[in-house]
Image (spheres, helix red, strand yellow):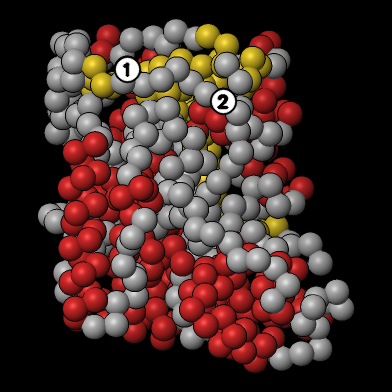
Amino acid sequence: MLVGWAGSAQAAPSMLMGREGAAAGLASSAELVGPESTPPVTWVPCPDNPAGECGTLSVPLDWAKPRGPRIDLAIARHKATDPARRIGVLMVDPGGPGGSAAAFALSGLFSPELRARFDIVGIDSRGTGDSLAIRCADLMTDRPSIYPADEAAFTTLLRFNQGVLEKCRERSPIFDHADSALVAQDMDAARRALGEQKISYFGLSYGTVFGQLYAEKFGNRVRAMVLDSVVDHSADAKRFVGDRAAAADDSFAEFAKWCDRTESCALHGQDVYQAWEAALVRAGDDRQRLLDSMYFALRDPDWQWAAELITGGQRLAFEPNYESVRLATVCQDFTLRIRNFGEYQRLRAEELRRSPVMRGSFLGHDEATACIGVSGRPTNSPHRLDIRNAPKILVLSARHDPTTPYDWAVNVHRQARNTALLTYEGWGHVAYPRTACTRGGVDAYLLDLTVPANSCPAPR
């Protein structure tokens, strides 16, 4: 689910605050909190990007206790460059979890027309960026193998993870208050603070979880919503790892086809699968790093790099640093509770059954095993999407995406009738910037509420 976007926005430092919230309650049915409970944002020029405005959004630490301690979340916006034709606010999130939405709002991803017609707003979700970032990566430097071979190795991993969780919780005041349902509440607080009746939303990858939950809770506050590379929040542990494992092998098959038809491929004219197996043998102790690097090459996709990984002409990639946030967010959004070695063996067998070439998915396996040792039910339990009072929502996905499988987009589309599915018949993770068709379809929908055609061809 990890998505990385470069950005230069830096919001004011966040802090945990003990002041009382206003006298507004939050009912168990997720009724809207009164606007008086959300102070307006004070905007200042962003230190690293004067074209953007930065500020902080005050929200309750726990939305079930709106009069309790409050926290500040970093928020940034790029104001519409054509105010006379301004449509409203486009709230955005790059996913991850762990990507800075504040920086993303000021990035170069969005077309000139979107930047002209919308105030583009990003809120660093809880535990990310300048919103009380959860920083526990240093606790994981001596992490045991996440591929335990026996009961003893599983127990070692379990106890290690439990130690990390305990220490990380001690460090972070929001560790137990960072699931996606709370982020959806924060989004609506931002809407109220900005004085908007409705918002448009554009979420990538894990940011689509935030969008889905917002549409469920506050559908009547949605003008338009794009969910690009959607995460299926109804997935159980078996599908969470199995679907992504199958998607990784599908992407490798596409890479092999490209090599077969492309003379510039370093493996052109060879048996790509045989060369891959030989490379894994040569890798020796670096075998897992080679598998992980291939996963990221397929995700871009960068097929020249993928070929060079097999021929040995390219250094291996290192894992991204998103370890801390996933413990507080992913482990509470999904039922990833592998309780013993027997359960692990069954999940691993499912991965290998569906992914004999790539031996599973880097992110699927990594996130599932990171949650070993987490106790109790997830605070934001996975469930089928239930959107009843929102307008037509656009779901966008590449057919060959190794990170968020295309089947997830299809399933989300089936669960919610008021969605439209736009399929990019190509490769890689995040579909919007791939072609003129994907970009134009999304832009037309956000600008004019025009639902695009069902598919966009891939370049050849």
Please state the horizontal and vertical placement of residue 311, each as a whole percent of the image: 71, 79
Circle 1: element type: strand
Q: Is residue 195 above or below residue 286?
A: above
> What residue sits 19% from the left and 78% below the top?
152
The reply to whether residue 233 is visible in this rendering is no
Q: Residue 351's mark?
A: none
Tell whether 440 sits left or right of 242: right
The reply to whether residue 434 is visible in this rendering is yes
The residue indicated by pointer 1 is 58
Most distant residue in the right direction: 263
- Of the residues shown, which amino acid type is indicated by label 1? Ser
Q: Quadrant of residue 36?
A: top left
> What residue sits 70% from the left and 52% below the top?
434
Q: Is residue 202 above or below residue 372?
A: above
The answer to which of 16 and 3 lies nearer the viewer is: 16
Tell whether 422 sits left or right of 41: right
- Of the residues shown, which amino acid type is indicated by label 2? Ala
Q: Quadrant of the C terminus?
A: bottom right
Circle 2: element type: loop
The answer to which of 199 and 356 lies nearer the viewer is: 356
> What residue sits 74% from the left and 62% below the top?
458
The residue indicated by pointer 2 is 9
- CB atoms at circles 1 and 2 under 8 Å apart? no
Q: Is residue 457 above or below residue 106?
A: below
Mark 1 vs mark 2: which is more N-terminal? 2
Please state the horizontal and vertical placement of residue 14, each as a whole percent of the image: 36, 21
Please state the horizontal and vertical placement of residue 38, each as a whole percent of the image: 31, 14
Q: Residues within 10 Å of mark 1 (few under 14, many from 20)?
A: many
Q: CA distance from mark 1 to mark 2?
A: 19 Å
